[in-house]
Each structure stands twice: as structure tokens, then as C-alpha cells.
Amino acid sequence: MKALHFGAGNIGRGFIGKLLADAGIELVFADVNQTVLDALNSRGSYDVHVVGEQARVEPVSNVSAVNSSSQEAIDLIASVDLVTTAVGPNILERIAPAVAKGLVKRHQLGNQQPLNIIACENMVRGTSQFKQHVYDALPEEEKAWVDEHVGFADSAVDRIVPPAAAGSTDPLEVTVETFSEWIVDKTQFVGQPPQIAGMELTDNLMAFVERKLFTLNTGHAITAYLGKQAGHATIRDAILDPAIRKVVKGAMEESGAVLIKRYGFDAEKHAAYINKILGRFENPYLQDDVERVGRQPLRKLSAGDRLIKPLLGTLEYNLPHANLITGIAAALHYRSESDPQAAELVDLLANLGPQGALSQISGLPADSAAVAEAVEAYNAH
């Protein structure tokens, strides 16, 4: 079996690419970073540092790489059995035209073997959104063939992969936490889903997508935003601050109450899941900056993302949400010299005020009680 994976960054190499290679799949990375491509092609392998109480180094082998905008990448789509991505939500649209060209070539070559595509991104139903971008780039007459021969399977991914340690000169060095979760919607495959250790198949993906979004992502973001406000540098420093921990745990319990109501999750098991997430934030071996986790505040404050979506759930079921509101207010305070979205947020606040800015970013009605609560919390700091 052969796979093409778009994105040779830390998550691509440390998480999805590693699982594919570990499963004995011949793996080709596609990326635009020439230094990384050259290193992968010259070595054909790299090491993953798994950190936690049982730290270890796990080698990944039988890998190569191509430029994602090259003819080679298009040719591979015509022949491989699986395409995966870990490029970031904003890049999916950019790689879609190459994927569309590869699918047309696959048809022209008469390759009738099923191809499945899985976007492994930090977003809800990312593969379905990627499919839309690919179809936008496909000629009309190709769509029926693609419908029949290509599956687009949504997934939920969860593994903390911090940037490489400062001072590291190896472009392939990557560090990951022990925990990982890759859950894929088995109902969306064409043909038999591949059997890959570490990939869990489900027919109820949204329950897992929202469990992760409402717990890990919500908690991570609020830890980052409150940590930045309090002057902490790392997620670990922030979550060990008792005042921050209280709000973060409270927010995850509020979002958890939505999940319990919506999907019938077991309350005790979900409480244990929240505690496991808090333990991951405390991992002393992961140096994860609050600035990295907090970046792109406009995306994180949008209607379908980690702060507003659980809030909407609490409004739907008439549940408490004070800690989520505190987290949303902290996100409005996020500032970073290196993040264009942070600069855009500053402009929106200056031009529209907190009420108008939050309403525009989140889609919440400007005159709603939730916006009023968030503005009050924002003004209190």
C-alpha cells in the first residue's frame, strides 16, 4: 500500500505520517519546504521523540518526499491508495487544485482502484470542506467518476506536537506527547477502509469531533489566552496557576454538560477525560508556548470553533457558561506581534468596539445576552 501525505511539518511527521509508516505503508510526503524535502529524500527516515514518563525515540523509515505543487505530486495522486493531509485549515484550499488534477489523471489512466482522502486537520469535518475545494477545481464531467471511485472520510485528530526545541538544527527533529487519537468516519470510505494501527473507525464521528473540540481545543485555547493575560510563557506554567486552572476546568465541564446532553456521554467517564486532558497540559516534557496555542484568534472565535460552538450548545440546552464567557473575553485580549489575525482583531476592536467586533467574528447577535456577558468580562480586565 502506498500513501501521499500533504504536510511534512511537525504534525505530519510526528503523528499521521508516523502512523502510516509504522503500519508498513510506503509513504511519500508532499510539502513546499525544500530543506525538509531534501532531508527526507537524502535520509529516507527520521526520529520521533515521544515524551512523557516513559520517554523514547521511535524511528520512522521508508519515507520520501515531493514538492506539493509539482507534477510528481499530481502523478502520485493518480497511483496511490490513500491521501492524507496535515497542512492547517487555511492551506487545504491551496492544495485542492493539485489534488483535482491528480484525480483527473487517475481517471485518464483508467485506475479503478478505490482512493480514500482524509484531511487530518484541527477543524470540524475538515475532509468534507476539503472535498468542496477539490470539487470546485474539478471539471464538471469528472465529478461523477470521482464520486464513484474516491472516498472523502472526515476525521478527528488529537496529539499535542510542540515546535522543535530552540537551538535545534535538524529540520526533521520532532517531539510528540505519548497520547494520540485518530478517529475516522468509516461510512465515508470507498471500498474497504485500510487497517492502520492507531486509526480508529467510527460511524458516529461528530460525537468524537465535538468531544475533542469542546474539551482539548476549548481547554487549550482558554489556557493560552488566560496564560498570556497573566504573563505566563507556556501552557504548563498557565495550567499550574490555580486561578487559570479553575476557569479552564470549569469551561471544560460546561462544554462537557453539552456533550452529555447531546450524545448521552457517561458523566463519570467524561469527567475522567477532562482530568486526562488537564494532565496533558501539565506535561513537563512539552514546552508549548501560550502564543503558539493562542494564534489565529479570529478563527478560534468563529461560530463553528472551540469557544463559540460550545457556548452555543449551553444556550441551546439552557446550561451555565460563565467560564466559557471568561475564555471568550480573554481571547479578545489576545495580542501577538507575529500573528496577522491578532493585528486584525485589534483593528476590529478599535473600529467596532468589543460588542460589534465579537458579534462580527462569532456570528452571535450583537444584542444577545451572551455578547453582553462577554463584553462585561472583557471590560473587567
Image (cartoon, helix red, strand yellow):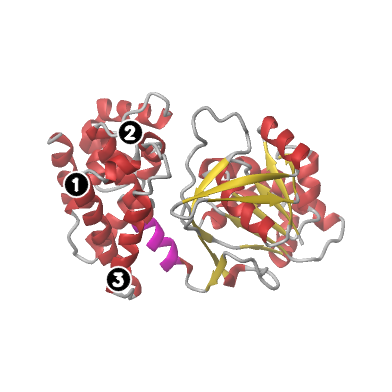
Give residue 264's quadrant in the image: bottom left
> Amino acid type of disc 1?
Pro
Q: Mark 3–mark 2 contact, CB under 8 Å?
A: no
Residue receiving disc 2: 233
Mark whose residue sits in front, 3 or 2: 2
Nearest the eye: 198 or 320: 198
Q: Quadrant of residue 348?
A: top left
Q: Which residues are magenta?
A: 206-215
Apparent side of residue 55 relative to residue 381 in the rendered image (left or right):
right
Name the spot of residue 334 as percent of width and height, x first.
30, 33
- List the residue tagged with mark 1: 242
Which one is nearer the viewer's eye here, 314 or 2?
A: 2
Q: Are marks 1 and 2 in contact (CB under 8 Å)?
A: no
Q: Which residue is mark 3?
A: 260
Cα–Cα gap, marks 1 and 2: 16 Å
Instruction: Give the residue at x 60% y 54%.
Output: 16
